[in-house]
Image: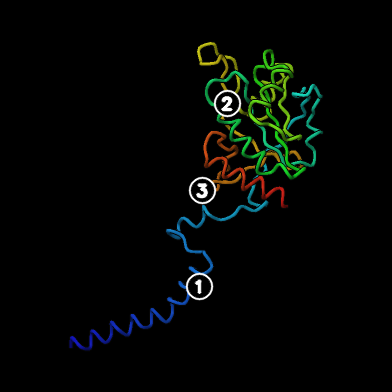
């Protein structure tokens, strides 16, 4: 009886090997094997269709670090990233700028990529100050505009246009508070976002973390290659 059981088990193992081993070998060869099948979803490359439209960027007009007037029309036809910052920020801004420089260096050869950095302390951040800041951080891309102008217009754009909070607060380090998030804009002027594992839009990308930069790099490339 025991011998029959061993024979049956051996037969099952043989059948399993014939059916599934070649498939496993194919997956290893193609690099499609992940730690677990449940992780495969997060590793899928985004498509343009998977990047959700979150609304259109409102019109704006500010002055950049070179004293040039820049409007949303200057970004027409370009994929670009938006942030709100200030040059004397002692906390997250240096991290954000460093990560934005990484995006600059990744896509600097593509004329269809751009960056818009809006100062939330425009009284201090004049074009001259912004120009010095650009030199300090290695901002060299022609399509990266550090923008300054009327403070109320900046806050309107941040808080209403993008729903990214920015404001003055004398009780916080630096006197101003804002998010560390980046917004991704497509060539038609729409804010775009990937969805999380539950199908909900993340809306913005964390500009202070390696994971956030990894995700936005992938999605910038997706939009540029569309």
Residue 152 visible in image: no
Instruction: Give the CA distance from mark 2 to mark 1.
Output: 46 Å
Label 1 sits on a secondary structure element that is helix
Q: Name the residue tied to disc 3.
A: 198
Task: Judge depth for marks 3 and 2 and give the one in front.
Answer: 2
In this rendering, position of residue 178 left or right of residue 8: right
User: Considering only vertical position in the picture, is 151 above or below 224?
Assistant: above
Residue 226 picture location, percent across and down: 73, 52
Q: Residue at x 70, y 48 (%)?
A: 223
Image-quadrant location for residue 7: bottom left
Q: Upstream in the sequence, badge 2 or badge 1?
A: 1
Tell me if mark 1 has few (under 14), some (14-19) or many (20+) residues whose alpha carbon lies within 10 angstroms of its own.
few
What is the basis of the colouring in this image?
Answer: rainbow
Residue 214 picture location, percent across and down: 56, 44
Instruction: Give the CA distance from mark 3 to mark 2.
Output: 30 Å
Task: Judge depth for marks 1 and 3 and give the one in front.
Answer: 1
Residue 53 picture location, percent across and down: 67, 43
Judging depth in this view, the residue of 120 and 104 nearest the camera is 104
Q: Residue at x 65, y 17 (%)?
A: 121
Judging depth in this view, the residue of 46 and 68 nearest the camera is 68
Q: Name the residue tied to disc 1.
A: 26
Q: Could you say which disc has been placed on residue 93 in the image?
A: 2
Residue 9 picture location, percent across and down: 28, 82
Q: CB under 8 Å between callouts 2 and 1?
A: no
């Amino acid at each position: 009886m025991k011998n029959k059981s061993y024979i049956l088990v051996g037969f099952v193992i043989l059948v399993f090997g014939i059916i599934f081993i070649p498939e496993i070998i194919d997956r290893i060869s193609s690099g499609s094997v992940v730690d677990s099948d449940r992780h495969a979803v997060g590793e899928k490359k985004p498509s343009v269709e998977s990047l959700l439209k979150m609304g259109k960027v409102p019109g704006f007009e500010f002055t950049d670090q070179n004293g040039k007037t820049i409007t949303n029309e200057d970004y027409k036809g370009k994929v670009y990233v938006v942030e709100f910052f200030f040059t004397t920020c002692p906390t997250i801004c240096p991290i954000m700028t460093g990560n934005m420089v990484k995006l600059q260096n990744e896509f600097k050869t593509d004329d269809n990529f751009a960056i818009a950095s809006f100062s939330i302390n425009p009284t201090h951040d004049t074009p001259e100050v912004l120009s010095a800041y650009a030199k300090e951080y290695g901002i060299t891309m022609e399509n990266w505009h550090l923008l300054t102008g009327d403070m109320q217009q900046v806050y309107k754009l941040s808080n209403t246009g993008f729903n990214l909070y920015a404001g003055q607060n004398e009780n916080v380090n630096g006197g101003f508070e804002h998010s560390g998030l980046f917004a991704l804009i497509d060539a038609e002027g729409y804010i775009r976002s990937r969805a999380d594992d539950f199908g909900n839009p993340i809306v913005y990308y964390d500009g202070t973390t390696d994971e956030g930069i990894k995700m936005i790099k992938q999605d910038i490339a997706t939009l540029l290659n569309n």
